[in-house]
Image (cartoon, rainbow, N blue to C red):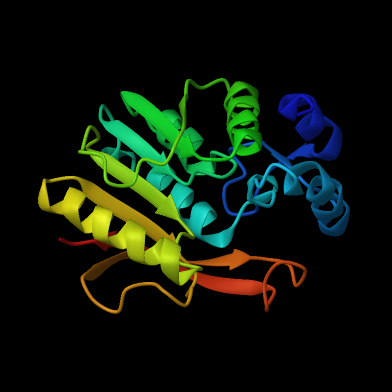
C-alpha cells in the first residue's frame, strides 16, 4: 500500500465546507479523478470508496449543531462514528469535548482524519476498527449520513439504541437517506446544506439533526 497520507495530500486541497467555515478539511476539488485514482489503488485491498474526501450533508449539519450548541459535548467523551473526514470529531474538539474518538474501518479515512485534525490544531484519537456492538465508553455519539445502505443501517441503529438505553446521547445528521428509522427520533435542528449534483440528486439538501431514542 502506498502512504495514505501522501496520497491524500496529493489528491486533495484544504477547503472549508459551506455550513462549517470554521473548519478546514482535505477535500477533493474534482470528484471523478479521485474516485478513479483510488479505484485501482483500493480495489485489490477491498477497501471502501473515498467517502473521506467529501463533506457530506449529514456531517455538516451535525457539526454545525455541535458548534452552535457546545453544551452537548463540552467536557464529555465523544465518539464520531463512521467519521469519514473527521468533520464532526473536529467540531466536537473545537466545542470543548474532554476526549474525542473518531472511528473508521478504512486506513485512508484514518489518515485523512489525522491530517484534518492537525490542520485544525485539535486532538482526535483515531480508532480504525468496527466498533458496532461494543459497550458504551462515551457520553455522546455523533453519526452523520450512516443510513444510506440497509445492512449498515440495520447494524448501526440496533447498536445505537442499545447505547441510548444506557444513557448515551446519540445524535445523527441525516439528509433524508432511505434507511433512516421511521420512529424513535427527536428533531433537534434543521439546516439547508449546499451540495453538488456530482454527489447528490440536488444542489441543496434539507438536513436534520436527530437524537435517537432507545
Given the current orientation, which residue lies at the most extreme left position? Answer: 166
Q: What is the count of numbered marks? A: 0
| Residue 99 placement (x, y as % from top left) | 34, 24
| Residue 155 placement (x, y as % from top left) | 34, 59
Evaluate whether residue 189 shows in this view: no
Where on the picture, by quarter, is residue 42?
A: top right
Residue 29 in the figure: left or right of residue 129:
right
Q: Which residue is drawn at 26% across and 27% down?
A: 75
Quadrant where the N terminus lies? top right
Residue 122 in the figure: left or right of residue 48:
left
Residue 165 in the figure: left or right of residue 27:
left
Q: Which residue is drawn at 12% across and 46% down?
A: 167
Quadrant where the C terminus lies? bottom left
Q: In this view, does 132 lie above or below 156?
A: above
Q: In this view, does 192 lie above or below 54?
A: below
Residue 150 in the figure: left or right of residue 167:
right
Amino acid at each position: 500500500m502506498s502512504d495514505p497520507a501522501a496520497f491524500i495530500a496529493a489528491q486533495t486541497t484544504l477547503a472549508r465546507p459551506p455550513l462549517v467555515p470554521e473548519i478546514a478539511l482535505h477535500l477533493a476539488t474534482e470528484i471523478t479523478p479521485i474516485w478513479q485514482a483510488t479505484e485501482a489503488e483500493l480495489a485489490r485491498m477491498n477497501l471502501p470508496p473515498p467517502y473521506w474526501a467529501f463533506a457530506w450533508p449529514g456531517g455538516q449539519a451535525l457539526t454545525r449543531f455541535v458548534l452552535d450548541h457546545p453544551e452537548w459535548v463540552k467536557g464529555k467523551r465523544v465518539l464520531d462514528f463512521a467519521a469519514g473526514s473527521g468533520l464532526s470529531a473536529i467540531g466536537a474538539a473545537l466545542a470543548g469535548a474532554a476526549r474525542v474518538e473518531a472511528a473508521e474501518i478504512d486506513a485512508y479515512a484514518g489518515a485523512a482524519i489525522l491530517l484534518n485534525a492537525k490542520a485544525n490544531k485539535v486532538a482526535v484519537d483515531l480508532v480504525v476498527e468496527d466498533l458496532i456492538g461494543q459497550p458504551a465508553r462515551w457520553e455522546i455519539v455523533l453519526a452523520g449520513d450512516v443510513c444510506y445502505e440497509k445492512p449498515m443501517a440495520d447494524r448501526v441503529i440496533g447498536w445505537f439504541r442499545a447505547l441510548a438505553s444506557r444513557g448515551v446521547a446519540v445524535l445523527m445528521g441525516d439528509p433524508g437517506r432511505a434507511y433512516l428509522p421511521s420512529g424513535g427520533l427527536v428533531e433537534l435542528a434543521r439546516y439547508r446544506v449546499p451540495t453538488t449534483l456530482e454527489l447528490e440528486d440536488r444542489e441543496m439538501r434539507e438536513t436534520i439533526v436527530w437524537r435517537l431514542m432507545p
